[in-house]
Image (cartoon, helix red, strand yellow):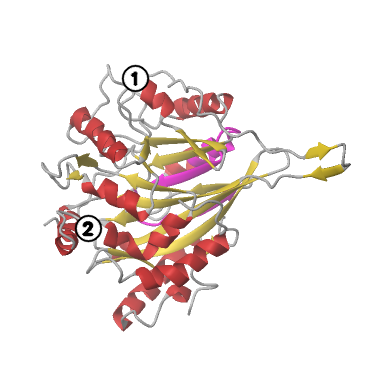
Amino acid sequence: MLEGRTRQLIVASWVVLGILAIGSKADAPDSGEAGLPESLPAVSDSGTIPVSEPPAASTTQKPTTTTEAQTTTTEAPRAASLAFTGDVLVHSRVWRTAAVHGAEVGADYDFAPMFEPIAEVIDGVDWAVCHMEVNLAADDSRLSSYPVFRAPGTIASDLARVGYDSCSTASNHSLDGRVSATYETIEVLEAAGLHHTGTARSAEESESSIWIEVNGISIAHLSYSYGFNGARVPSDQPWAANLIDQERILSDVAAARLSGAEVIILSLHWGEQYIHQPNSQQAALGPLLLASPDVDLIIGHHAHVVQPIELIDGEWLVYGLGNAVSNQLQLPRRDELLVTATLIEQPDNSFDIDLEVLPLHLDTETLTLWPSGPDLQTDEMSDQLVATLDASWLRTLAVLETGSGWDHFELVGGESIPR
């Protein structure tokens, strides 16, 4: 994984390398899901999840003075770039498409070509996070699609090959196939070298799995879901999957800060499916959590469509990224976001976060993720694909314009909306 990439290098790497790399690698209908309850469910097994000490982080670099030479040397501030993409929702058509790619390289499945156009962006940041919405099968068998998902575990190793470092895992499908499938999914992710947060196999793991260290910055990344499609977390295994509860989250992030977290990020699986605007739950809970001194960034999932981005008192609230890969074919459900948060250390050792937003679109024919921005299109693209990407760009920007973050983040792919 490359270190310390700036936004210019990320964009340039996609334009120069990503396009050239597109060709280098060698029956479920759309599924709807039940909408959210009108109010957030309470945690069935109350009590705060304690947070253990994080891995030892590098000492914060401070100005040092060499008295003998009477010169002062100031170390560069620490910085790190983290990328987030939408729901990995593996319907049967997704794994069947991966089987076709796999046959071309002598494998059972190959999901990497679906991510090929954005691979340079994913691999170009310091830490890339997927949102794994479904459970995985270690042996690529016992597969199932909506409403109870179990996808080939091969997707985990393919995501790692593309450049992902970790996955948030708390979703309404976390308990599909019961808790044994939840634990098997964690094993598959770990075998692929992917970090995970949001589900856990033990109390100890629930405490330790939130921690990552990127370029010497100690980061706590916590993941929660609004519910589990009617399934309940086992009372004797309350750590299995994290349920959204305001008081629990505030307690968890406060404990993480006390344990040494320099930056705290929440991934929240929430919102009303297929609705672009945040529902009343999101609109109330998001700003409240972000107002806590212990929350620095919120990344949202579950709606399966792009939702607005808010900037509240200098902090980012990304309500919803949309999908990553899925078989949801309606056009708005194929518009997506890749957001890159760049952490920059300040003189007081706090961190500012700059946000880049790269609109994406999932091509329905090949299930390939393409950046939709007009500045990133090439002569090799068909007229039909260009028209599809232009339309996606317009739809996505129309949604983003409704958020207070508009004009404050860096939009990657074009300067303005083509009319």
Q: Is residue 78 magenta?
A: no
Q: Which mark is first along the chain, 1 or 2?
A: 1
Rendered view: 274 above or below 239? below
Rendered view: 180 above or below 45? below
Stretch in magenta? 286-312
The amino acid beneath tag 2 is Asn
- Residues 63 and 385: in front is 63
Which residue: 31% across, 44% down?
A: 132
Q: Please indicate, yes or no, whether residue 236 appears anywhere in the rendered image.
A: yes
Answer few, some or many: residues within 10 Å of disc 2's Cα (few below 14, many 20 plus, some between 14 and 19). many
State the separation of the CA atoms marked 2 and 1: 35 Å
Rendered view: 354 above or below 211? below
- Residues 367 and 161: in front is 161
The amino acid beneath tag 1 is Asp
- Residues 155 and 66: in front is 66
> Which mark, by number, is residue 398?
none
Instruction: Identify the residue under disc 1.
Output: 45
Rendered view: 204 above or below 365? above
Q: Is residue 306 magenta?
A: yes
Residue extending furthest toward the front:
68
Which residue: 14% across, 61% down?
A: 103
Instruction: Identify the residue under disc 2.
Output: 327
Q: Is residue 55 left or right of residue 177?
A: right
Return the x and y of residue 311 as percentages of the image width and height: 58, 50
Return the x and y of residue 183 as percentages of the image width and height: 25, 30
Return the x and y of residue 84 as percentages of the image width and height: 43, 50
